[in-house]
Image (cartoon, grey):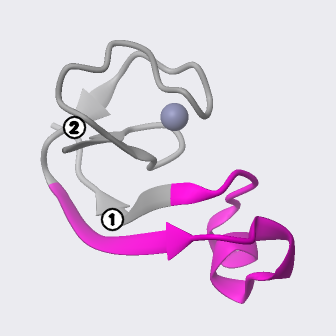
């Protein structure tokens, strides 16, 4: 798995375009997993600015 640099979504390594935000920049250096099932009713999701259900990284490092 790798994480989208823009929205922190976790996607399979062979993904070229982020399905959540359409970003094309990914990082394999990330920490922590958040599973967002119901973004409208999740405090974690609103804290992280997540609007779509899915798996997200808590921290994404870029070089
Ligand atoms: Zn994204």
Picture coordinates of residue 8 (x, y %)?
Answer: 44, 49
Choose the circle earlier in sequence order: 2 or 1. Answer: 2
Write down the residue under mark 2. Answer: 27
- Residue plotted at (54% across, 44% down): 7
Q: CA distance from mark 2 to mark 1?
A: 10 Å
Picture coordinates of residue 44 (x, y %)?
Answer: 63, 82
- Residue plotted at (41% across, 15% down): 24
For the N terminus, the quadrant is: top left
Write down the residue under mark 1. Answer: 59
Picture coordinates of residue 51 (x, y %)?
Answer: 76, 54
For the C terminus, the quadrant is: top left
Q: Is 41 on the left or on the right of 19, as rendered?
A: right
Does the segment drawn in magenta span residue 50? yes
Instruction: Relative to 25, say whether 34 is above or below.
Output: below
Q: Where, by quadrant of the figure, is residue 28 drawn?
A: top left
Which residues fall within the magenta stretch?
A: 30-54
Q: Residue furthest right?
A: 40
- Residue plotted at (86% across, 70% down): 40
Does the segment drawn in magenta span residue 19? no
Q: Where, by quadrant of the figure, is residue 37 drawn?
A: bottom right
Q: Secondary structure at mark 2?
A: strand
For label 2, the crowd category at 10 Å Cα-Cα, with few meaning under 14, some 14 to 19 and many 20 or more, is some
Q: Is 46 on the left or on the right of 33, as rendered?
A: right
């Amino acid at each position: 798995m790798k994480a989208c640099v823009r929205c922190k979504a976790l996607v399979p390594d062979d993904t070229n375009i982020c399905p959540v935000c359409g970003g094309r920049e990914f990082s394999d250096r990330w920490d922590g997993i958040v599973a967002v099932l119901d973004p409208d009713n999740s405090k974690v999701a609103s804290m992280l600015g997540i609007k779509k259900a899915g798996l997200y990284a808590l921290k994404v490092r870029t070089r």
